[in-house]
Every structure is written in C-alpha cells, then in structure tokens.
C-alpha cells in the first residue's frame, strides 16, 4: 500500500536525521556540512520570503544554523530535521522583522520628517547590487510590456487606477465611465496582466532564489568557522 511505503520512507528519513545529528553532536565536521548543503536552499528561500532581502536572508540562515547547532541535543526526531531547522529560521526571520520595525518606529519618533521620505523602487537596498538592480529593471520591463499589451479599454483604467493612483471616482470621471465599469475593467485588466506575466516568468519561478555555488559555500564556511572548525 502507498501509505506503508510513505511511512517507511519517513521512518528512514528520521533515522538518517538522527544519525546526522548524533555525528554533529560529536563534532563531526562532515555532518555539519552535510546538513547545511542539504537544507541551505530550502532555508534560504524561507528566510528570504519573510525578510525579502537576499543578504539579510543569508544572515538569518547563518544565525539560525548557529542557534540550531548549539542546541542539537534538543532534537529528538519528533519532526524531520528539515522541519525543525525551518522553524528556527522562521523564528529568527520574524524576530529580525520585529526588531527592524521597532528601530523604524524609534527613528520616526525621534525624527518625524523621516516618515515623509520615500525610497523609490527599484533602488531600495539594491542600488549597490548591480545584479539585483538589473533583475528588478527586467521585471519592470516585463510589467511595462504586459501593460502595453492590454486592450485599450482595460489599459486606460489600469494605468489610471494602479499606476497613477487615481480613485475609482476620479478614474470614472476621467474616462467618462460609471464607477462599476471602472471596477469591472480593473479586475479584468489585472487578470490579463497576471496571465501574461505567468506565461513569461512562471516556468522559471521554481529556480527563483537559487542557493547553489558560491553563496552556498560562503554560508557553509562562515557557519563552520563560527563553530570552531578550520
């Protein structure tokens, strides 16, 4: 039965996890590296999905690994090692978000003028990251082309409401339409836009935020050094 095969596989995975953890607790460097190389990409994607910044996501994963590796004795195999590590990453990432928000609120309380400052997209934190800035420009170009491809009746509403930021009433007045028509056309425009973007970039999303190569090695080496391995 399929259920039996799945249970057997889960049991084998747990046993493998426990063996890796046992070796890591015994300060086996290869065990640490195996754990990280196995879960780096998954944990990075989770962290990045929360903090929405590549370099900060790396910091989150590194801190989570150090925290996990210094408390490996608490891993009992009640869940998979992947799940256990993922929870630690999520807690670390959410903690960073909370601290970041607190710092922002503190800055605003001491200088209210900061609340009026607007950081334009796509610059944000990636102005010093040419690769990310280029990727953001490419995404903007895709959105622009998809918008250009909308039928006139939908494109005008979409640009007025979404790009120019007009209200439903202002858009209706501008285009001589009923508010209900504006809402209907905007809904349709968004549907068409999503469809175009899905067709263009959907197939590559599975490869988004890769964690192979230098980034994986850099993170693994940094954690190993913090654990006292050369």
Image (cartoon, rainbow, N blue to C red):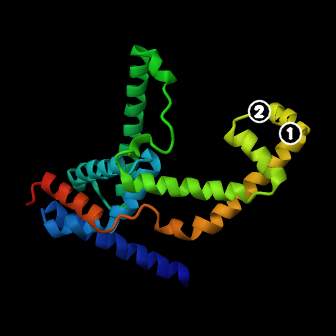
Give the spatial CA distance, label 2 vs label 1.
12 Å
Q: Nearer the viewer, residue 5 or 20?
A: 20
Q: Can you identify the residue that label 2 sits on?
A: 167
Q: Residue at x 48, y 77 (%)?
A: 6
Numbered circles on residues, count: 2
The answer to whether residue 53 is visible is yes
Disc 1 packing (10 Å; few <14; some 14–19; many ≥20): few
* Disc 2 secondary structure class: loop
Image check: 108 left or right of 165? left
Image check: 224 left or right of 171? left
Image check: 43 left or right of 171? left
> Eyeballing the image, is 108 above or below 15?
above
Of the numbered discs 2 and 1, the one sitting upstream in the chain is: 2
Q: Nearer the viewer, residue 22 or 226?
A: 226
- Asked where in the image residue 101 lies, by quadrant, the reply is top left
Q: Residue at x 49, y 53 (%)?
A: 136
- Asked where in the image residue 173 lies, by quadrant, the reply is top right
Q: Can you identify the residue that label 1 sits on?
A: 175
Q: Which residue in the rendered view is the most extreme toward the bottom?
A: 1
- Asked where in the image residue 31 lies, by quadrant, the reply is bottom left
Q: Nearer the viewer, residue 129 or 191?
A: 129
* Disc 1 secondary structure class: helix
* Dot in front, 2 or 1: 1
| Location of residue 167 in the rendering, given as x and y in whole percent from the top left corner | 76, 32
Q: Label for residue 51?
A: none
Quadrant assignment for the C terminus: bottom left
| Location of residue 140 in the rendering, given as x and y in whole percent from the top left corner | 56, 53
The answer to whether residue 79 is visible is no
| Location of residue 66 in the rendering, given as x and y in whole percent from the top left corner | 23, 51
Q: Residue at x 42, y 45 (%)?
A: 51
Image check: 103 left or right of 220? right
Q: Residue at x 42, y 61 (%)?
A: 209
């Amino acid at each position: 039965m399929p259920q039996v095969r799945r249970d057997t596989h889960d049991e084998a995975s747990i046993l493998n996890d426990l063996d890796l953890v046992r070796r890591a607790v015994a300060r086996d460097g290869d065990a640490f590296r195996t754990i990280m190389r196995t879960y780096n990409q998954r944990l990075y994607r989770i962290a990045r999905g929360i903090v929405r910044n590549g370099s900060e996501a790396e910091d989150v994963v590194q801190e989570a690994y150090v925290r996990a590796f210094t408390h490996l004795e608490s891993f009992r195999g009640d869940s998979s090692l992947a799940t256990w590590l993922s929870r630690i990453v999520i807690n670390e990432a959410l903690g960073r978000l909370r601290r970041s928000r607190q710092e922002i609120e503190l800055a605003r309380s001491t200088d209210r003028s900061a609340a009026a400052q607007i950081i334009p997209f796509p610059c944000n934190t990636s102005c010093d990251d040419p690769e990310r800035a280029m990727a953001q420009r490419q995404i903007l170009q895709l959105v622009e082309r998809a918008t250009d491809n909308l039928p006139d009746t939908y494109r005008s509403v979409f640009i007025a409401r979404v790009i120019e930021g007009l209200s439903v009433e202002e858009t209706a007045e501008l285009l001589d339409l009923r508010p209900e028509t504006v809402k209907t056309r905007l809904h349709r425009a968004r549907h068409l836009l999503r469809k175009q973007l899905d067709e263009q970039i959907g197939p590559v999303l599975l490869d988004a935020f890769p964690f192979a190569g230098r980034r994986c090695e850099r993170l693994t080496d940094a954690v190993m050094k913090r654990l006292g391995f050369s």
